[in-house]
């Protein structure tokens, strides 16, 4: 079977993530969604739940999975806000 690809704007996701058997397809998709946004994009679980079909619990689970496997880190800032950082090769 072959896949026909059309020309369109696209994001890039690390191949290591795509072949990582410890990461669910849901978490890979969330990483791709987050990676596609500009660096100054304000991510919250609530805002992502409004923009995606997944609910807050599902997004939270995917984020925990990505964080526990080193694909995403989270830092609480002195302002009380937090900042997600996406890793391109956690191994």
Image (tube, rainbow, N blue to C red):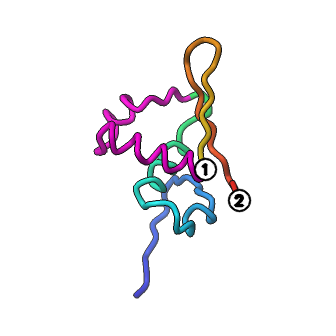
Q: Residue at x 39, y 42 (%)?
A: 59
Quadrant of res 73: top right
Decide: few, some or many residues near mark 1? Use Cα within 10 Å; few <14, some 14-19, many ≥20. many
Q: Residue at x 60, y 11 (%)?
A: 79
Provide the residue designation for mark 2. Answer: 91
Q: Earlier in the sequence, mark 1 or mark 2?
A: 1
Q: Position of residue 27 (x, y in %)?
A: 45, 53
Q: Which residues are magenta?
A: 41-69
Q: Residue at x 41, y 40 (%)?
A: 60
Provide the residue designation for mark 1. Answer: 71
Q: Position of residue 85 (x, y in %)?
A: 63, 38
Of the 4 image quadrants, the one containing the C terminus is bottom right
84 relative position to 8: left or right:
right
Q: Residue at x 56, y 45 (%)?
A: 67
| Residue 58, placed above or below residue 22 | above
Quadrant of res 46: top left
Please check the rendered image and state whether residue 88 is part of the magenta-colored stretch, yes or no: no
Of the 4 image quadrants, the one containing the N terminus is bottom left
């Amino acid at each position: 079977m072959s896949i026909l690809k059309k020309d369109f704007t696209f994001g890039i996701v690390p191949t290591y993530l795509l072949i990582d058997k410890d990461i669910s397809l849901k978490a890979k998709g969330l990483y791709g969604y987050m990676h596609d946004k500009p660096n100054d994009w304000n991510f919250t679980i609530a805002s992502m739940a409004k923009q995606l079909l997944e609910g807050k619990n599902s997004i939270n689970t995917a984020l925990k999975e990505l964080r526990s496997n080193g694909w995403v880190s989270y830092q609480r800032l002195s302002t009380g806000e937090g900042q997600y950082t996406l890793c391109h090769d956690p191994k």
